């Protein structure tokens, strides 16, 4: 098995929304904001090369939305999916499986593209797609707070392609043989968000997704206003961080533009950030 960090692009989000009730003088110590109160964010995917499979975890925004849509997110930097894949010796047509932690647009937008004739089609012509069945159903009947995060043109064409596979297992920790890695399932941010747990060499890497978007979100009370069930997020983060510290898990950060692979340590204030590196540096 080989792992590759795939940088699909960078964007910005309101710092207050990203940290909820935590005061700005606290969160800006780790996540400084610009003059519009926005913090810098990454849309970082993880590519798993395992025998004859290439599994891409999340896809970033994609590029099919219009300028008005992207104007809200302050896109910055030069990263994109295709150049990042190419830098690691791959092409999007090489991808065999696209695993989506959940269906918010910054995680699944790149799964679908607009074709030359104006149709929405899979952006990976040789890949199948993996989504949790309960989350799929949740996205089809969204609550008012979350509705804007589920964009139909990102989601419906996946089903229409005939290549949608469902993860159906229930529980907080799922043994998953279909893809070769296990899953932590959490419900605070959205229903049935899936965090891949990957055994790599002699370490365990957890794709942190939106449970812990940046290192600034490691302290338990630091949670997003976007979370649909914030009290559940608090419980899930506490349990997750205790396990992560005890078992020496490394966290692969999807949304932190400056910290890719993170280790943890116990302090008198609880579990905290220890060190950061890249996959290439660490392994």
Image: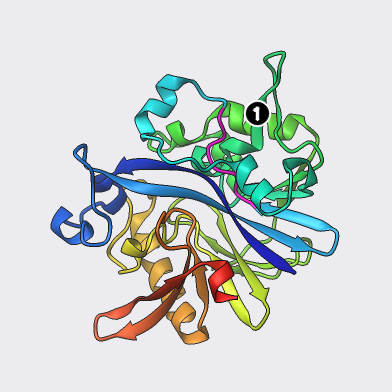
Q: For this view, does 228 lie left or right of residue 252?
A: left
Relative vertical location of residue 45 with respect to residue 233 in this rendering, above or below: above
Q: Position of residue 152 (x, y in %)?
A: 57, 27
The residue tagged 1 is 113
Q: Position of residue 222 (x, y in %)?
A: 29, 61
Relative vertical location of residue 117 with respect to residue 248 in this rendering, above or below: above
What residue is drawn where x is 38% and y is 50%? 227
Q: Position of residue 196 (x, y in %)?
A: 61, 63
Position of the N terminus, as image quadrant, is bottom right
Membership of 162 in magenta stretch: no
Q: For this view, does 117 lie left or right of residue 268?
A: right
In this view, the residue in front, 57 or 22, is 57
- Which stretch appears magenta? 57-63
Number of residue marks: 1
Q: Position of residue 135 (x, y in %)?
A: 58, 47
Q: Residue furthest right?
A: 52
Q: Quadrant of residue 245?
A: bottom left
**Residue 95 visible in rendering:** yes
What residue is drawn where x is 65% and y is 50%? 87
In this view, the residue in front, 65 or 145, is 65
What residue is drawn where x is 60% and y is 77%? 204
What residue is drawn where x is 34% and y is 56%? 230
Q: For this view, does 136 lie left or right of residue 104?
A: right
**Most common secondary structure along the magenta stretch:** loop
Q: Quadrant of residue 184?
A: bottom right
**Residue 172 visible in rendering:** no
Pointer 1 local density, CA inside 10 Å: few below 14, some 14–19, many at least 20: many
């Amino acid at each position: 098995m080989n792992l590759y960090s795939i940088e699909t692009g960078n964007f910005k989000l309101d710092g207050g929304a990203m940290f909820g009730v935590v005061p700005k003088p606290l969160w800006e110590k780790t996540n400084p904001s610009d003059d519009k109160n926005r913090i810098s964010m990454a849309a970082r995917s993880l590519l798993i090369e395992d025998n004859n499979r290439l599994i891409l975890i999340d896809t970033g925004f994609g590029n099919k939305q219009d300028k008005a849509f992207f104007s809200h997110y302050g896109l910055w930097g030069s990263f994109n999916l295709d150049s990042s894949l190419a830098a690691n010796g791959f092409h999007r047509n090489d991808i065999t499986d696209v695993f989506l932690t959940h269906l918010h647009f910054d995680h699944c937008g790149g799964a679908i593209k607009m074709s030359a004739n104006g149709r929405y089609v899979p952006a990976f012509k040789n890949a199948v797609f993996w989504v949790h069945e309960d989350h799929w159903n949740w996205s089809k009947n969204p609550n008012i707070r979350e509705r804007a995060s589920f964009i139909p043109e990102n989601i419906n064409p996946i089903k229409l392609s005939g290549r949608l596979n469902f993860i159906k297992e229930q529980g907080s920790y799922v043994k998953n043989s279909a893809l070769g890695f296990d899953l932590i399932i959490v419900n605070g941010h959205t229903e049935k968000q899936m965090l891949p747990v990957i055994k790599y060499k002699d370490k365990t890497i957890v794709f942190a997704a939106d449970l812990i978007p940046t290192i600034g979100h490691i302290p338990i009370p630091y949670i997003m206003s976007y979370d649909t069930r914030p009290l559940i997020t608090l419980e899930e983060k506490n349990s997750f961080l205790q396990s992560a510290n005890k078992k020496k898990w490394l966290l692969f950060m999807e949304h932190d533009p400056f910290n890719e692979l993170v280790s943890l340590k116990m302090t008198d204030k609880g579990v905290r950030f220890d060190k950061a590196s890249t996959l290439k540096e660490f392994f």
